Amino acid sequence: MDLSEEIIRDRMLGCLYGQAIGDALGLGTEFMRKSEVSKYYPQGLSAYSQIVGNANSNLWKSGSWTDDTDMMLCILDGFENGHFDINKIALNFKEWFNGDPKGIGRHMYNLLYIGDYVKDPIYASKVVWESSRCQSAANGGLMRTSVVGLPRNIKNMDIEDICRLLIMIQDVWGLVWWFLVLLII
């Protein structure tokens, strides 16, 4: 099936907007137990005005997305000349980190705190992994890397870059997920 550029563009925008809107709404239930979600949102959560404030959600203004979408946009901004530029993405992550990132987890903080992260993000990831005795691995890559599936033609080099990107943010489950996707392709 040959899709028009307009349909592909529309699907890409749907993915991006869907992620940002879903992330902003999902903030209302992030870190809640199922019983809390049932208590505070018995009819479901469909509007930002419904979000019950807590220590986590109060970090953001109503309707704002979280660090997951911020980092996804850093990755998207690293898409140049038909592929993902790992060094540009590392620079984007570092610039975001040097701003006022909200909700950044301990793992990503430790990783992006390293001064040489931009110079060699893969090595920095290895240092953080080993310093945690190989116990600290983030799982945010599933949300953050949704954009890597948007290009029309994923080539072998892009697949290698996707794996490098997931290693950069030490997303073990993301590596497994992308491996499964690649098996299907």
Image: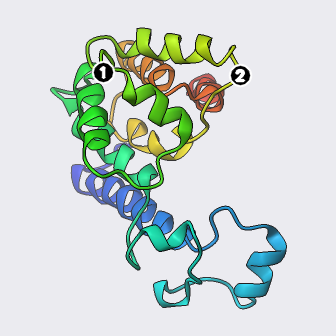
Residue drawn at point x = 33 percent, y = 53 percent:
12
Q: Which of 172 and 16 is in front in this view?
A: 172
Q: Residue 135 carries which label?
A: 2
Q: In which quarter of the image is residue 168?
A: top left
Mark closer to the chain start, 2 or 1: 1
Residues packed near mark 1 inside 10 Å, few (<14), some (14 to 19) or many (20 plus): many
Residues packed near mark 2 inside 10 Å, few (<14), some (14 to 19) or many (20 plus): few
Q: Nearer the viewer, residue 2 or 27?
A: 27
Label 2 amino acid? Gln
Residue drawn at point x = 79 percent, y = 67 percent:
33
- Image: 72 above or below 48: above
State which mark lies toward you, 2 or 1: 2
Q: Position of residue 14 (x, y in %)?
A: 37, 62
Q: Tell me the SS state at disc 2.
A: loop
The residue that label 1 is drawn on is 86
Q: Which residue lies furthest to the right in this view?
A: 35
Label 1 amino acid? Ile
Q: Where is residue 60 in the image (x, y as percent from the top left)?
A: 41, 70
Q: Which mark is residue 64?
A: none
- Image: 9 above or below 111: below
Q: Distance between the residues labelled 2 and 1?
A: 24 Å
